[in-house]
Amino acid sequence: MQEKTTAELFNALKRDPDVEEFLANNQQEFSKPFHEYLTQLLADKHLTKKFLYTEMNCEPAHIYHIFNGTKKPSRERLAAIARAMNLNLDETQYLLRYGGFGILYPRNPWDAVVISATEHNLTVAEMNELLRQLGELPIFTEE
């Protein structure tokens, strides 16, 4: 469980000349690996991997690889996971940042569609259809 603020960690790191000691003393403050965060989020939302791959219309193995950490999802696939998990916009933006991607930006047409789909609670399939209708690339699906 994280107890220190990011500012406190920065200050401790600046003060402590021994980075090895800093790392050892602050182990509980570090972020979980991405696949562990996703697994925790799935549990928090009371969802299953089966629900995700069904909702996303993708191969089960793809979801399993993402959740066991052997495959890094693309930004687009993370947007689909966020919609399948019914994440709100703040949760979606956090998921994208945690996954190492930029947040959704309303001046980018593809991002604007995903933002709108999130705000209007569209399913992954509905979001894909809206992307297609508006001339944007849909999230890859194995249809």
Image (cartoon, rainbow, N blue to C red):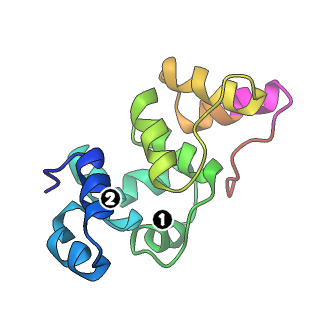
Residue 63 is labelled as 1
Please, is residue 40 above or below residue 89 in the view? Answer: below
The dominant secondary structure in magenta is helix
Could you say which is closer to the camera, residue 35 or residue 16? 16
Q: Is tag 1's residue or tag 2's residue first in the polypeptide sequence? A: 2
At x 60% / y 37%, what residue is drawn?
125
Could you say which is closer to the camera, residue 74 or residue 105? 105
> Which stretch did the figure color magenta?
129-136
The answer to whether residue 138 is left or right of residue 99 is: right
Residue 115 image offset from top left, x and y in percent? 58, 25
- Which quarter of the image is occupied by the N terminus? bottom left
Q: Residues within 10 Å of mark 1 (few under 14, many from 20)?
A: many
| Type of the residue with mark 2 | Tyr
Residue 87 visible? The answer is no
At x 58% / y 58%, what residue is drawn?
58
Residue corresponding to mark 2: 37
| Type of the residue with mark 1 | Ile
Magenta stretch containing residue 19, yes or no? no
- Indicate which label's residue lies in the foreground, 1 or 2: 2
| Quarter occupied by residue 105 | top right
> In what element is the residue under mark 1?
helix
The number of numbered badges drawn on the structure is 2
Residue 20 image offset from top left, x and y in percent? 27, 82
